[in-house]
Image (cartoon, grey):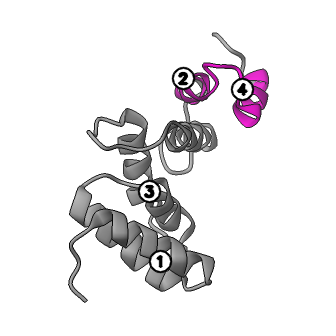
Amino acid sequence: IEYRSAVAAHNLATVYRDQGYFDKAFEFYHKAYELSEVPSIELAYCHYFGIGTLKRQDTAFHLFEMISKDQFEFGNTPHDIDQANYQLGIIYLEGELVERSIEKARHYFLLVNKDEDHEMALTMLQIVGKSD
């Protein structure tokens, strides 16, 4: 198979994922990223949880950061950006992958909940506080 379209590769990944072929899904999510240089939230989660690939949380963290910044012409959806920000907040709160920082966690939770409509981020902000 000759790979040329990032959109087609991403769509194939979704089909494979829905059929339970996680190795193939990861392969095509990764191919879509190689072709477009735009990371997908699905690729980040595959790395983070080890779905269809080895668990590489450091790689996932980097992808979440890239999605959070969303500086791509044909980038991620607002929902994907919110998901990346929420995951970054959790990562900073847990402090296992990076140095624990409630301030950084709060920052990401506030980004997600800027419209006060993200239930989980709101819950986390109730726990860590909305300000120092």
**Could you say which quadrant of the image residue 12 lies in?**
bottom left
Q: Is residue 53 in sight in this rendering?
A: no
Q: Which residue type does callout 4 highlight?
A: Asp
* Mark 1 closeness class: few <14, some 14–19, many ≥20 residues within 10 Å: many
Number of other residues with Cα within 10 Å of mark 2, as a class: few under 14, some 14 to 19, many 20 or more: many
Q: CA distance from mark 2 to mark 1?
A: 32 Å
Report the amino acid beneath label 2: His
Identify residue type, mark 1.
Ala
Q: Which residue, given by chain and number where applicable, does mark 2 sit on?
A: 107
Q: Quadrant of the N terminus?
A: bottom left
Q: Is residue 82 above or below residue 48?
A: above
> Can residue 100 be seen in this snapshot?
yes
Residue 100 drawn above or below residue 56 = above
What is the distance, in whole Å, between disc 4 and disc 3 at their CAs? Answer: 25 Å
Residue carrying label 4: 117
Residue depicted at 47% across the width and 42% down the height = 77
Q: Nearer the viewer, mark 3 or mark 1?
A: 1
Confirm or deny contact between disc 3 and disc 1 (CB under 8 A): no
* 121 sits to left or right of 27: right
Determine which residue is flagged by label 1: 25
Mark closest to the chain's N terminus, 2 or 3: 3
Magenta part of the protein: which range?
A: 104-127
Q: Quadrant of residue 58 in the image?
A: bottom left
Which residue lies under the disc numbered 3?
60
